[in-house]
Amino acid sequence: MAWRPQLIALDIDGTLLDFDGTLPGHVTQAVRRVVDAGTPVVLATGRGWYSTQGIHEALALPKGPAVCSNGAVVVEHPPFRLLSVETFDPGPVIRRVNELHPQAAIAVEVVGRGYRLNKPFPQGDLTGELHYQSLDDLCAEPVSRVVVRDPEAEREAFFALADQIGMHSVSYAIGWSTWLDLAPEGITKAHALNRVTADLGIAADDVLAIGDGLNDLEMLHWAGRGVAMGDAPDEVKDAADHVTGLFAEQGTATELGLWF
């Protein structure tokens, strides 16, 4: 029997949304065909739930799981239900980042609500409630994610931070810009999707995953068919089973159209 995906895992930024944050009609239509076929669609994103919910609803996805915060948070919607949260002690890594790169802005996620942060991020980077606190307060309790940002830094020098921090208790996800996500050790989109699919009785080999970022590497390795967007960095393309077209060339819709 020919292979056909039993679940679709979709990154959001650069996969469903363009780089201006627009959800094109051709993407919505392609996802609707998947939903109408009765195949589960799971958003798998670095975004927190607060900024994921609007995309979930814009796509009119039926009740089901969504993987947020690079796998540290899994929710069910609608209605909202928190399924799992992975946390860690942020103190050591926050203090180490501040020691190595004191000009960086640091935020910790408040699941479903927003962030606590030590200084302003560029406008539009973070959504939800934003509460400014001291570094000591940011370190005070377990969190699901730490975000480090410095728009003034050189990208290469900024991402050398991941190596300099050198902590085995956290996982690192690097963004397109000078953005670094820190999560509990071993927590990735693939980790969370593996739990989601196990609960649904679907094998990883039967999953089609599409993404474009370095935080999608594990997901594309894990899925039965991992597809990189044409805009993705070379290391993401190399990890994929297939490379679809550029976002502007309707790469996401093209891949989904092969199956639905």
Image (cartoon, grey):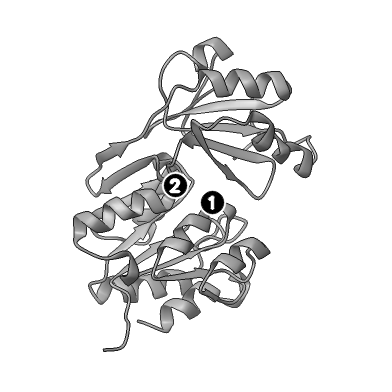
Compared to residue 108, the image places residue 208 above or below, namely below
Q: Residue 40: where, in percent of width, then height?
A: 27, 65
In the drawing, what numbered circle is on residue 215?
A: 1
**Place of residue 121 in the rendered image (x, y in percent of width and height, measured from the top left):** 64, 31
Report helix, strand or loop for mark 2: loop
Residue 40 falls left or right of residue 227:
left
Q: Which three-letter amino acid code belongs to the residue tagged 2?
A: Thr
Front in this rendered view, residue 79 or 216: 216
The answer to whether residue 131 of the structure is visible from this angle is yes
In the rendered structure, which amino acid carries the disc numbered 1?
Answer: Asn
First along the sequence among labels 1 and 2: 2
- Residue at the (54%, 14%) spot, across then down: 133
Q: CA distance from mark 1 to mark 2?
A: 8 Å
The answer to whether 57 appears left or right of 76 in the picture is: right
Nearer the observer, 57 or 171:
171
Residue 127 higher or lower than 260, as above or below: above
* Disc 2 packing (10 Å; few <14; some 14–19; many ≥20): many
The quarter in which the N terminus is drawn is bottom left
Q: Position of residue 96 (x, y in %)?
A: 63, 21
Q: State the residue at coordinates (56%, 55%).
A: 21
What residue would you read off at disc 2?
Answer: 188
Is the residue under label 2 in contact with that under label 1 (CB below 8 Å)?
yes
Q: In what element is the residue under mark 1? A: helix
Residue 178 position in % (x across, y down): 69, 41
Quadrant into which the C terminus falls: bottom left
